[in-house]
Image (cartoon, grey):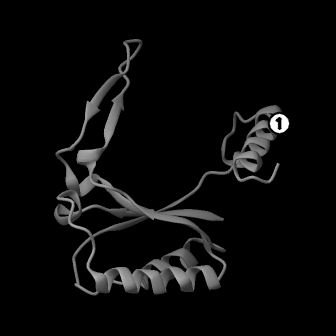
């Protein structure tokens, strides 16, 4: 099963203050553990919302673009991992080992990545197309 581990941004990351050298070193070691264990599929940090945009859809109206920064920093994504784990419990155990050298309070959200079989209206044709597109985007085709 694939899980998205969502790290929420905080006031410092939204202000463009990058992580400390200590945190970067500990995160690199943690990522190395994830790679050696064969569970890390992807993982990145994100720039502040001031460098981003939101596209807001409102019925049949033309989508509206809203430039950052965004007011609610506690609900913004600051980074993520995609982990391949046996189950949610294994993913939780990995996340509990995340470095936090400054002892900051925060929330990390874990969500299972939906598979084709999770969608009741998925037709075999669309499932096959999605599989081909995934392989193609990964460079496997």
Q: Which corner quadrant of the image does residue 128 belong to?
A: top right
Q: Which corner quadrant of the image does residue 1 belong to?
A: bottom right
Residue drawn 43% across the image and 85% down it? 97
Instruction: Return the x and y of residue 63 as percentages of the image width and height.
Output: 37, 20
Q: Give the left or right position of residue 94, taking residue 47 as reference.
A: right
Asked whether the viewer can see residue 25, the reply is yes
Compared to 34, does 54 lie above or below? above
Find disc 1 in the rendering and name its residue.
124
Toward the front, the furthest residue is 21
Residue drawn 20% across the image and 44% down it? 69
Compared to 35, does 139 lie above or below? above
Helix, strand or loop at mark 1: helix
Which of these two is toward me, 21 or 70? 21
Residue drawn 38% across the image and 14% down it? 62
| Number of numbered tags placed on the structure image | 1
Which of these two is toward me, 50 or 132? 50
Which of these two is toward me, 93 or 19? 19
Q: Residues within 10 Å of mark 1 (few under 14, many from 20)?
A: few
Q: Give the left or right position of residue 73, taking residue 92 as reference.
A: left
Asked whether the viewer can see residue 100, the reply is no
Instruction: Return the x and y of residue 104 as percentages of the image width and height.
Output: 22, 78
Residue drawn 22% across the image and 75% down it? 105
Compared to 66, does 97 lie above or below? below
Instruction: Return the x and y of residue 43 as percentages of the image width and height.
Output: 50, 66
Q: Give the left or right position of residue 82, taking residue 137 as reference.
A: left
Q: Which corner quadrant of the image does residue 88 belong to?
A: bottom right
């Amino acid at each position: 099963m694939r899980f998205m581990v969502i790290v929420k941004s905080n006031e410092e990351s939204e202000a463009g203050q990058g992580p400390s050298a200590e945190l970067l070193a500990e995160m690199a070691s943690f990522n190395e553990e994830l790679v050696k264990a064969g569970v890390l599929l992807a993982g990145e940090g994100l720039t502040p919302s001031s460098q981003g945009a939101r596209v807001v859809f409102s019925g049949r109206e033309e989508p509206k673009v809203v430039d950052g920064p965004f007011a609610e920093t506690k609900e913004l994504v600051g980074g993520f991992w995609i982990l391949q784990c046996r189950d949610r419990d294994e993913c939780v155990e990995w996340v509990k080992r995340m470095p936090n050298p400054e002892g900051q309070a925060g929330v990390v959200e874990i969500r299972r990545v939906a598979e084709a079989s999770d969608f009741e209206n998925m037709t075999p044709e669309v499932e096959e197309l999605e599989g081909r597109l995934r392989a193609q985007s990964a460079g496997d085709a």
